[in-house]
Amino acid sequence: MRHSVTSCLMALPPHAQPPTPAGGLARWRAWLGEPTPPLPGDDVRRLTASILGLMGWGGLALLALTWLFVDSATPRAMASTGGLVALMLLLQRWVRQRPGTRPAAVAAALALAGGLVWVAYAGNVQAVQLMVLVLPVMFISFLFGALPGLASAGLCVLTVSLLAWAQAEGWSGIAPRALPPGNQAWVFSEFIVLTSLLTLVLRGQLMRSYLQTARERLQREQEAAMHRIHSRLAMAVRVGRFGVWEYDIGQGEFLIDERERELYGLPDEMTRAGLDDWLRAVHVDDLARVREVFRRSLAGEAPYECRYRIVRPDRQLRWVHSVGELERTPDGRVVRLVGLDQDVTADAQAQAHLQSLLQRLHLATEVAQLGVWEYSFSTRLFVFDEVERELFGLHDEAPITRERVRELIHPDDREATAQAMQRVIDGATQYESRFRVQRGDQVRWLRGLAHVERDGAGRPVRLVGVNWDITADVRSQRTLEDVNERLRIALSAVHASVWEYDAQTRRLQWDDRGPDLYGVDLNGHRQAWESVLSPHMATVTRERIYTHLKDPTCQEFDISYTIEHPERGLRHIRSVARNERDHQGRLLRTIGLDMDITPQVQTAARAEELTQRMQLAITAAGIGVWSSRLSDTAVEWNEQQYQIFGVDPRSFRVTRAAWLERVHPDDRERLAQEIATVHLHATGVTSEFRIVRPSGEVRHLRAVARSTRDEAVTPPARWA
């Protein structure tokens, strides 16, 4: 019972519950001064009417029982009790006809007043009779709050106290008398029954109020939950840009929302669409499949989910992902299909782009023979594709562990590959390595690149990479290095330097032999080489070079000039260059070779000097010089030779036969044999013979001849 009362009190609003002793004076004042009933107005009116009816009809029943079974009941007591019962019934009727809480409060006050009058009229102030006043005080306190309840209790206490004092002083005219034990028991029984009934009525009202409050709270919670679900669904539809539709099977038409109209490019005023309208928008290549999926869904054979293309009225092509659920009646009949459409054009395009990239990647890896691999740090296992297996010479299905791969790597490269892996573990974003693998008797060079994937803590999880065979590149690089080294040696031997001029950046770059060739730092400034040009030809040299660079038809040029070397003095330089131009003839780049030709120039000058001296000696001594090529029997004479033979060089055509005709007949055969065998003598031959001039004069000559040979050594190419 205590638990039930506590539960009922907890169901009351906070202002209807008494404050705790620690609540403070302000809390007590607020509690006492609270005028608002703890129940709604209609509930207060109905409960007041119920209590008044209980007191009236219960009192009437008890009055009848008293008249029948209690012999000591006096007519005066019966009359006063009957009047009180009548008052209660009248008040009940009056309260039922008046809305609001005010009639209920008035009726409660009148019921209390009637009880006080009944006590005063009975003239007997005894506790067992006064208990009847407890009933109105109880329901006044319950219905109208602490202050009305305490006021009604105080009024009863004051009235009963005055009545008791008056009886004690003899003012009331009624002498105090005690009720017989039987009457006291009867009155107590009446009070117990009425109190029990009143308690049941109050309890019933409390339970109804509590249940009503619980139902309202549950309804509010359900409405709030539905509102939250609806809000979240609306947000999901809005954020996900879903179009909502319903297909009414009976009507054969769709009910569509704003987003669905926007997706299909339909007018704003169009809220319904027929089945044919929808199917006309579906791409012709997807129409048969969409029809079949829609039919099976309406037949209940499969859930409705489809991905298809539509063609909007503005001819735009869009991809749609559509899902739906069937709604059925309680008897299982399908009435409508409710669904969502989402524009997935961007996803479809991204997937198509991804597929294209994958195809290109596959083609690239196939053409370039790239081996694709993955490494898991958790399992310490590699996954190789077919090309990667071929690169490593693996043809079995055994697990590819890190240790197994390490054994296939050349011993000299294992430490470098391990360090590359350690750099990834330490935080590097990429894996890069260059190593050799041993495949039987073959050693192949591979290069690897990989991207590392990490978890939230930054630890490496997986490597995804490629390897490719660079053996040919390595060999080509080594060959190129050898050629470059030989070229460097050759250029050093001939004192040459290679330079490059970039016309776009106007940058002139020399190799490391340039400073030695010119004696200045050539890379410090673009025109540094001009500072050492010989003053007498500096202007001409610059103009010649710039003319070749600017001429759109010039592809190559070869010029010579002199410089004043800071340490070696006057030096002769030969510059040979090639121009690279675009299709319009504009200069892109020039690559040149400058070499020191001072020794060659000096040698040529010395040879020219010696030639001039020899020519002077020959002229002074009257010596004729001749030569004959054995390959074509051509013969050449100098001017002195013509004078010796007495012929005019303008009219005499020199041949071997014409020459021999001028030889004396007695010496001609011998001289011809000596000329034919001159190549057999390494040191040459000396011969004396006679000639006959056109004038008939005979002259004695001495000839000294020596053969010269080509690169094949024999036979001789020339003799003179």
Image: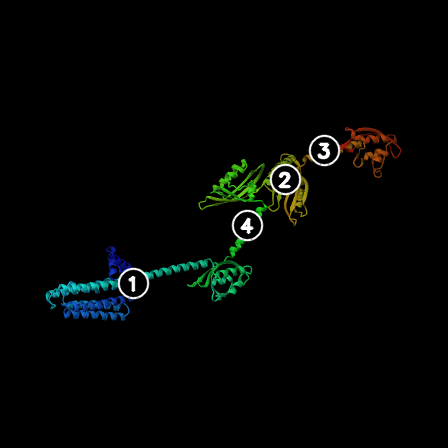
The residue sitting at 57% across, 46% down in the picture is 365
Q: Is residue 237 left or right of residue 487?
A: left
- Callout 1–callout 3 Cβ contact below 8 Å: no
Task: Point out the image quarter for the N terminus.
Answer: bottom left
Q: Which residue is mark 2?
A: 498
Query: Which amino acid type corresponds to the residue marked 2 in the rendered image?
Result: Val
Q: Position of residue 643 (x, y in %)?
A: 83, 34
Of the residues shown, which amino acid type is indicated by label 4? Leu
Q: Are marks 2 and 1 in contact (CB under 8 Å)?
A: no
Residue, far right: 696
As measured in the structure, the alpha-carbon distance from the residue carrying label 4 to the one carrying label 2 is 46 Å
The mark found on residue 208 in the picture is 1
Residue lying at 88% horizontally and 30% vertically, measured from the top left: 666
Residue 301 placement (x, y as % from top left): 48, 59
**Mark 1 or mark 4: which is in front?**
1
| Mark 3 surroundings within 10 Å by alpha-carbon count, few (fewer than 14), some (14 through 19), many (20 or more) | few
Earlier in the chain: of badge 1 and badge 3, it is 1
The residue labelled by disc 3 is: 606
Residue 665 percent coordinates (x, y) = 88, 31
Q: CA distance from mark 1 to mark 4?
A: 71 Å
Tell me if 656 is positioned left or right of 505 in this view.
right
- Of callouts 2 and 1, the N-terminal one: 1
Mark 4 highlights which residue?
358
Sequence-wise, the earlier of marks 4 and 2 is: 4
**Marked residue nearer the N-terminal end (1 or 4):** 1
**Mark 2 to mark 3 CA distance (whole Å):** 29 Å
